[in-house]
Image (cartoon, rainbow, N blue to C red):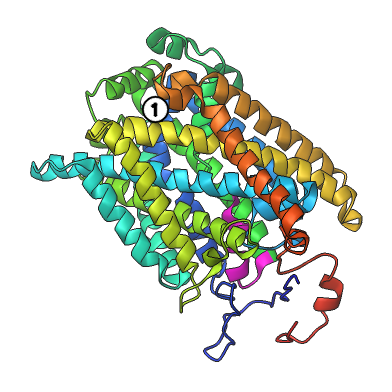
Amino acid sequence: MTEVITPSGGGSAGPQAAAPPAGRLADQALGLPSVLFCIVTGAAPLTAMLFNVPVAVQGGGYAAPAAFLIATVALTIFSVGYIAMSRRVTSAGGFYTFVSRGLGRVAGAGAGLLIGLCYIIFVAAVVGVMGYFAATSVQTWTGIELPAWLYMAIGLAVMSALAWFHIELTAKVLGVMLVGEVLALLVLSVAVLVRGGAEGLSLAPFNPAAVFGNPSAISVFGSAASGVALFAAFWSWVGFEMAPNYAEESRDPNRIAKIATYGSVIGLGLFYMLCSYAYVAGWGLEGSVKAVSDQFSGVFASAFYPLSDRYVGHWLTTVIELLAVTSSFACAMAFYNTGARYLFALGRERVLPSVLARTSSRHSPAVASMTVTVLVALYGLGFVLYDPSTEGALLKLGTWSPLLGVLGILAVQALVCAAIIRYFLTTARDGFNWFSTLVAPIIGGAAMVGACWLLVANRATLAGAADVPFITLLPWLVAAMFVAGMVIAVVMRTRNPARYAGLGHFTLADPELDRVELHRPKHAAN
């Protein structure tokens, strides 16, 4: 039987609050700031700028800020319907629950397994980026040369340790790291703008048309493609949709999900546009593309470092080098948490082994978290064996893996758009709105499908490897993960119809029951 727990209003749970039942996460553990920290650190603003702006410039030239503008608009429109759905369906299952409610349990199980594995792949990818920045920075500071995989192992071990504690501790750790990286980027951006950049301040970088066939990018990189720039932009937001995954641990799930989602999408969009514009202005329109070429050639570790040297001072460069490591760690930790919650939700509903739904004494998804650790370690080990070099941690594990993860997430987001439309046309007709639950999901879904097509078409350019099986088979790997989840659901429907009936239907606020539940006493048993 589906368990329905009435969400209670603001205020934190007191020391005498009842412990969550088995298979439940810590109740009322997170307020709005904590949820925002968990979400925004998943986007990792500093890592996104150091890693993704050069990729966006490779495809869109000096118009990289316009690529972030396009992504901001597309994801904001997507969020309209997403928030409408999250107000009705509140569960740690996130996308899995949404697709199950809108498109059925079979499609939901496919989406759940795909999205859970994508987040685990993201953890491995960002751990690789962290290992690269840690190895290069430590060598620069001390002359000690240690392999990137050693730093990767240390980082994963620390994440695993934090996962055993109450989620609020992780949120505080992520919050401290987030504040540091945002301040560093703001200092650099303001310094560039105040000093007028290399050639003065121009509005040309914000022209969306300039993203497509940008002459400066083509002159340096050859057949530059808009898909490269847009991939880098969309990849920078991965994790913005995490708010519903923390619903069971939030003090006011509906309000927090809305504010946190809009705040992360729009806030990050404005911040990314500012920082990418400061990068372009700091180097100049043509110089910004040449600087990326120099970075890719190994002239410097990041095209941002000479900017901080020139416009602020070497002390800021050193700070950014340090924060690049902590930012990557925070990003990986946020993905780690979300991946664990997807495994937890899938285990609770028996799509995956039920042991994944066991929690620690502090009500963290302990078994699911340790499973993420094992999967990340095995996945990362495969890449390390393929290329153990420090550069391989960035250019292979850190570059190839996000292509797989982003493609999977964009595909599931398109499915979510379809699920929102069907859900409000059938199950929740009283909540139907012509814009938020129809037009916005149609536009958002079309944007996600278009982004998927651009990523697939340009995957060889993005990876820098045309004939590697991992890259050529990329779309089929995504399809295989989705089909595997569907097969699990079909088998369950045949062998255990009662269990199948509960797939995707664990929720804190079920629209069919909330009218009754909201009038029950706060701590009433079900």
The reply to whether the magenta stretch includes residue 246 is yes
Q: Badge 1 local density, few (<14 within 10 Å), some, or many (20+)?
A: many
Question: For residue 259, what is the image quadrant?
Answer: bottom right
Q: Is residue 11 left or right of residue 290?
A: right
- Marks counted in the figure total 1
Question: Vertically, is 300 above or below 133?
Answer: above
Q: Residue at x 83, y 42 (%)?
A: 438
Q: Is residue 240 left or right of residue 200?
A: right
| Quadrant of the snapshot with the N terminus | bottom right
In magenta, the rendered stretch is 241-253
Q: Residue at x 39, y 31 (%)?
A: 279
Predominant secondary structure in magenta?
helix
Which amino acid, by three-letter code, is at mark 1?
Answer: Pro
Q: Position of residue 403 (x, y in %)?
A: 49, 32
In this orientation, does residue 511 appear? yes
Q: Position of residue 47 (x, y in %)?
A: 38, 42
Q: Residue at x 63, y 56 (%)?
A: 351
Residue located beneath label 1 in the image: 54
